[in-house]
Image (spheres, rainbow, N blue to C red):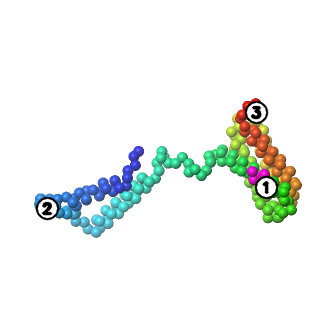
Amino acid sequence: MKKVSSFVVIAVLVRPYIAEAFAPSIEGRSRTQLHAIPNSRRDFLTSSIAISSLAAATSAVVLSPFPGVADVSDGNALPEGALQFSRVIKVRAQLNSVAKRVADRPSEIDKAEWDKIDDFLRTLYSAGEDMKVIAKGIYEPAKKTKADEDIKLLQSLVQVAQKPVSNGDSAGFAVVAAKVDGLFEDFFDLLRDIPDEL
């Protein structure tokens, strides 16, 4: 489908008036004179409104992207599956960072920071939901069953981690964080399709 320029449409609509305006007079005079059509103000306003509305409608059609010409993606979002995988990797990295902070300087963590860690546990729990989406791509039944078990265990451990976080127990949180990180590692191992022999 070809795009029609709004200038072409306007030129086609206005063309008869231009042709009559600059045509030699009908009386056959020897000189060329302007032969304008006598219009009233109302006719002028009506025709100018019609032309401007037609130009606006044409430009809206011309400027809107056609399905075959539109961008496939804006480039600012990942497709489903890759988005969940990216979030799981980020949450695991954040878990390691939080666990290191809690293990290295437990005396410096105040109530506000423990509250932020509690909020992070919600993010960690939702990573389990992303893992469920990723696990749908596992086709081997034994691996899929193991992945589902790991996800359930991960989410239950995150719920267990809320007690040490609410009590400000850094040692208890470190134990749970290490187990959750191990479950992340097991889950990523299940996603590997390449045999160990290679």
Quarter location, residue 152: top right
Residue 15 locus on image (x, y percent): 27, 56
Q: CA distance from mark 2 to mark 3?
A: 96 Å
- Of the numbered discs 2 and 1, the one sitting upstream in the chain is 2
* Furthest-bottom residue in this view: 41
- Secondary structure of the residue carrying tag 2 is loop
- Secondary structure of the residue carrying tag 3 is loop
Residue 159 locus on image (x, y percent): 81, 52
Quarter location, residue 26: bottom left
The residue under label 1 is 98
Q: Report the disc number at residue 31.
A: 2
At label 3, counting other C-alpha atoms closer than 10 Å, the crowd grade (few under 14, some 14-19, many 20 or more) is few
Residue 148: in sight, yes or no? Answer: no
Q: Amino acid at mark 1?
A: Val
The residue under label 3 is 196
Q: CA distance from mark 2 to mark 1?
A: 91 Å
Q: Amino acid at mark 3?
A: Asp
Q: Which residues are magenta?
A: 93-97
Residue in the picture at 23% in, 57% down? 19
- Of the numbered discs 2 and 3, the one sitting upstream in the chain is 2
At label 1, counting other C-alpha atoms closer than 10 Å, the crowd grade (few under 14, some 14-19, many 20 or more) is some
Give yes or no for residue 123 being in the magenta stretch.
no
Q: Is residue 80 above or below residue 21?
A: above
* Figure quadrant of the C terminus: top right
Q: Amino acid at mark 2?
A: Arg
Quarter location, residue 113: bottom right
Magenta residues, dominant SS class: helix
Q: Is residue 138 above or below residue 35?
A: above
Residue in the picture at 25% in, 56% down? 16
Residue 109: in sight, yes or no? Answer: yes
- Of the numbered discs 3 and 1, the one sitting upstream in the chain is 1
